[in-house]
Image (spheres, helix red, strand yellow):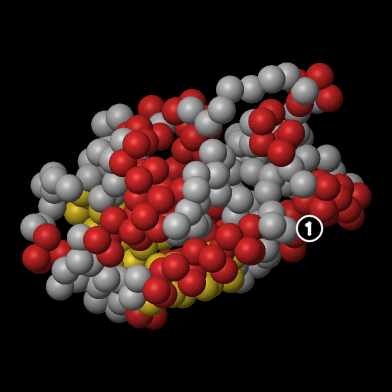
Amino acid sequence: MKFTNSPNSADLKKKSLFIRTNYGDDAIALLQWLFEAGFTGTAVYVDTGFAAASWQERVVLGEAHARRLGFEVVHLHSKIPFSEAVLGRGSFPSVKFQWCTGLLKGLPFVDWLESVDKKGEGVILIAKRKASALAHATLNEWIPQCEFHGDRALWHPMIDVGDDERNSLLQRAGFTPLHHRSLECEPCVNSTCQDWQRIQTVDAERLHALEVEVNVSWSEAPTATTATTSSAPKTKTYLDLFYRGCGNHFGCGI
């Protein structure tokens, strides 16, 4: 892996590394890459209170794998779960008003960072890749100060990793590609028709119950007509949807 305007590998290994992970494909691959490259650090997952019912199993597997590789594992919880936030605001987030990520994932993570990295000398890692989204075409591997992480350095080690190499990392980790985003929030305001076709009954029923309770509909849901429209497999444009607005800063869908 080359380093662009970043400290060399030896210097980085002396730093406290905090890996933002939802245990999706790219995040699992990043943990494997770090292990093989001789890095260690802390894998941090934030429970939004709105993950797919099935996603907990993936998180358990991901955390167990991270521990096997020698990483410290931290499992945080949003101070205000998604349902409480919706009830308090009287509305759901939307593509136009994406208040969800900063509240559910950003604040808990940064608050935790301030308690364990008081001097702000740690490095944040997110598994963004150019091959996964057009939005990352010009993304720097190394950002010396990231305003969304308390001005700490931000590192994208996977930025130049292609799909084949990513899949090889997954295979060596003992995982097979999901072919969809991570499901730490289900649905997401940027869910595609393909995502809505995949949503499990238990998650759809939970959403409906919340709609009834708040007396507001989830406005981003496709209509019955668009929901049945065929959709291409996960592509650059698929993940680009999840890098619109605030989700881009906190690694949504990874």
> 30 or 169, which is in the foreground?
169
Q: Residues within 10 Å of mark 1 (few under 14, many from 20)?
A: some
Q: Nearer the viewer, residue 143 or 16?
A: 16
Q: Position of residue 181 (x, y in %)?
A: 55, 43
In this image, 233 relative to 27: left or right?
right
In the depicted view, which residue is nearer to us: 193 or 88?
193
Task: Please give left or right for residue 182 compared with residue 236 in the image.
Answer: right
**94 is higher (above) or lower (below) than 76:** above
Residue type, numbered disc 1: Leu
Q: Residue at 23% of width from left, 67% of height from top?
A: 39
Circle 1 sits on which residue? 87
Q: Secondary structure at mark 1?
A: helix
Q: Position of residue 70 (x, y in %)?
A: 33, 75
Q: Where does the image place residue 30, in percent across and percent down from the top left?
A: 34, 54
51 left or right, relative to 20: right
Give residue 121's quadrant in the image.
Answer: bottom left
At x 26%, y 50%, the residue is 157
Q: Give the percent coordinates (x, y) of residue 149.
A: 35, 60
Residue appearing at x 33%, y 67% in the figure: 18
111 displayed left or right of 155:
right
Can see residue 140? yes
The residue lying at 58 percent from left, 60 percent from top is 58
**Which corner quadrant of the image does residue 112 belong to?**
bottom left
**Is any atom of residue 126 visible in this view?**
no
Q: How many marks?
A: 1
